[in-house]
Image (cartoon, grey):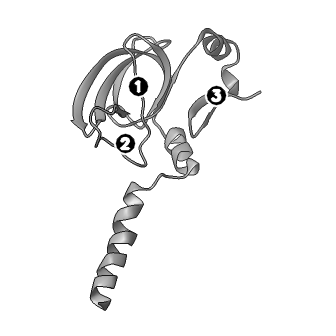
Amino acid sequence: MKIKLFILSLIIFTVLPAFAIMPSDYYEKMVNESEIKTPAVVKKIRKIDNKKGNIIYRVYFESMYQTPEYKFNGVCYSFKKNMPWDEAMEGRRFYYPVKNSEVFVTVSKDGGFITSLIVMDEKFKEKLKTYPETLKYNAWGAYFAK
């Protein structure tokens, strides 16, 4: 009985944390430590894998304001429930990129994971041009400090 209890507690303390949702400090650190932080256009989206509705995409970007053109890519998860047993992976951020959309994206490194993806509207683009020094980052991505 003690061995079974030990094995059960070992499983709980080693396996379950892998599926836990991470605290916002973790995501904020990932965004802030990203090597790529830029406004970009989504040029191409390629599906890499699909497991129980958890779709993995490789997204190809072209930076909007850098010359010469800076092209890079990143990987992200999306979720779409197709079957009753499909369940979103815990602890993952899901992004839904759209081809030709203008976004502010942070990527850990070229080819790495997308750490934030915000669709830019005209107000965001205007602030980026007028007040770039007020651009800050939090767990959700880029925003402008007041």
Q: Is residue 7 above or below residue 104?
A: below
User: What's the residue at 37%, 37% (across, down)?
Assistant: 113
Amino acid type, residue under disc 1 in the picture: Tyr
Q: Which residue: 41% across, 25% down?
A: 96
Q: Residue furthest front?
A: 84
- Which quadrant, please, contains the N terminus? bottom left
Tell me the CA gap for discs 2 and 3. Answer: 27 Å
Viewer-closest of 57 and 55: 55
- Sooner in the amino-acid sequence: mark 1 or mark 3: 1
Q: Nearer the viewer, mark 1 or mark 3?
A: 1
Task: Please state which amino acid type lies under the numbered disc 2.
Answer: Ala
Q: Determine which quarter of the picture holds residue 61.
A: top left
Image location of residue 88, percent across then percent down = 37, 42
* Mark 1 lies on residue: 96
Could you tell me the amino acid type at mark 3? Tyr
Residue corresponding to mark 2: 88
In the picture, measured across the screen, residue 130 lies left or right of residue 103, that is right
Q: Which of the image's four quarters has the C terminus?
A: top right
Q: Residues within 10 Å of mark 3 (few under 14, many from 20)?
A: some
Rate crowding at label 1 as few (under 14), some (14 to 19) or many (20 or more) other CA atoms within 10 Å: few
| Of callouts 2 and 3, the N-terminal one | 2
Is disc 3 placed on a helix, strand or loop?
strand
Looking at the image, how many numbered discs can be counted on the residues? Answer: 3
Q: Separation of disc 1 and disc 3 at Cα?
A: 19 Å
* Numbered disc 2: secondary structure: loop
Q: Which mark is residue 143?
A: 3
To which quarter of the image does residue 16 belong?
bottom left
